[in-house]
Image (spheres, rainbow, N blue to C red):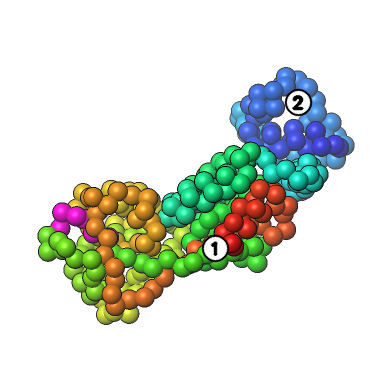
Amino acid sequence: MDYRQLKYFLAIAQEGQITKAAKVLNIEQPPLSRQLKLMEDELGVKLFERTGKWLKLTPAGELLRNKAETLLSQFNEAIMEVKESGEEVTGILSVGSVVSCISLLPKRIELFRERFPQVTFKISEGDHFYLGELLEKRMIDLIVARLPFESMTQPEKYGVLPLPSDPFVAVIPSSWTGYEGKTSICMKELAQFPFLTLKTDKTTRMHELVVGECRQHGFEPNIICECSSVAIIMTLIAEGIGATVFPKSVMSSFPTNVVKMLDIVDADFQSEVGILWLKDRYLSKSARHFIDSFRSD
């Protein structure tokens, strides 16, 4: 069994059909079918079960997929490391970011490309679990996210560079009366507001942090909407639906003419931010330089 066969096998596992896998691999279907049969004959096991038009991995197939993904990842990383053995920094740097941290990237990318103009960027957005999965599959090099990072991967597998913490602020509709000219607010004033909170089925840390702070000030927030999207929450606030508490840096990514940001004078709770990568994987030269650019601040 060789590298090519493992690549073929993973394509079939991913697509669930030999026909679709052949298109992805840009080869004919009969040779791909023959390669699969050769693999099964060599191993003496069935790797797939046919269920209608689809192929489903057998337990033996699941085991091989896990091993094959690791082997191919190590092989590709070895090739990348050899190619990057020279002095030049080039290629594509793939960065994942949660929406609330996107504002940290534009200036950093601009300065980085002034120093390394041959590096291009690919940005992916999502929640912790989605970005963690992309990192595991080597589809991105690093992640910029709120801490602690919530994913299926064990925390000790991540390298983490903490960034300056980010204070929380209250965000209310500009249309609400009584707040003209104000720049700050007390926590207990938030008790009267219909409240919007950032929460997904899997990522709950920011929600818990904000609700916990409200409880410390003696009230339960009147939560009328839990939402997985920062952008949607900002749209609802702009329409006068309710208010929220967000890290201050989030506001630089959204227009402030339809929402109003207020400092919270009697609470000093912060959102922790960091850059994460997998410690046991090869980190590209461009990714290492990008991480180092944050250390220089």
At numbered mark 1, what does the secondary structure look like: helix, strand or loop? loop
Q: Give the x, y percent position of residue 105.
A: 49, 51
Residue 281 horizontal side relative to residue 125, left or right: right
Residue 152 horizontal side relative to residue 176, left or right: right
Pick the residue in front: 86 or 40: 86
Tell me which residue sits at (28%, 75%) in the image: 265
Start-end of magenta stretch: 171-176
Residue 166 horizontal side relative to residue 68, left or right: left
Pick the residue in front: 263 or 2: 263
Using the rendered view, name the quadrant where residue 30 is placed.
top right
Q: Residue flagged by tag 1: what amino acid is it?
A: Asp
Q: Residue 21 magenta-drawn?
A: no
Tell me which residue sits at (72%, 22%) in the image: 27
Q: Name the residue under label 1.
A: 297
State whether residue 86 is above or below residue 295.
above
View extreme (front): residue: 114
Task: Work out how far the residue at label 1 is from the one at label 2, CA to CA, in angstroms.
Answer: 52 Å
Tag 2 or tag 1, which sits nearer the N-term? Answer: 2
Q: Residue flagged by tag 2: what amino acid is it?
A: Leu
Q: Name the residue under label 2.
A: 32
Residue 66 horizontal side relative to residue 270, left or right: right
Q: Give the x, y percent position of residue 281.
A: 72, 54
| 10 Å crowding of disc 1: few (<14), some (14-19), many (20+) | few
Tell me which residue sits at (78%, 31%) in the image: 36
Q: Can residue 238 be seen in this view?
A: no
Q: Quadrant of the C terminus?
A: bottom right
Q: Give the x, y percent position of residue 220.
A: 27, 73
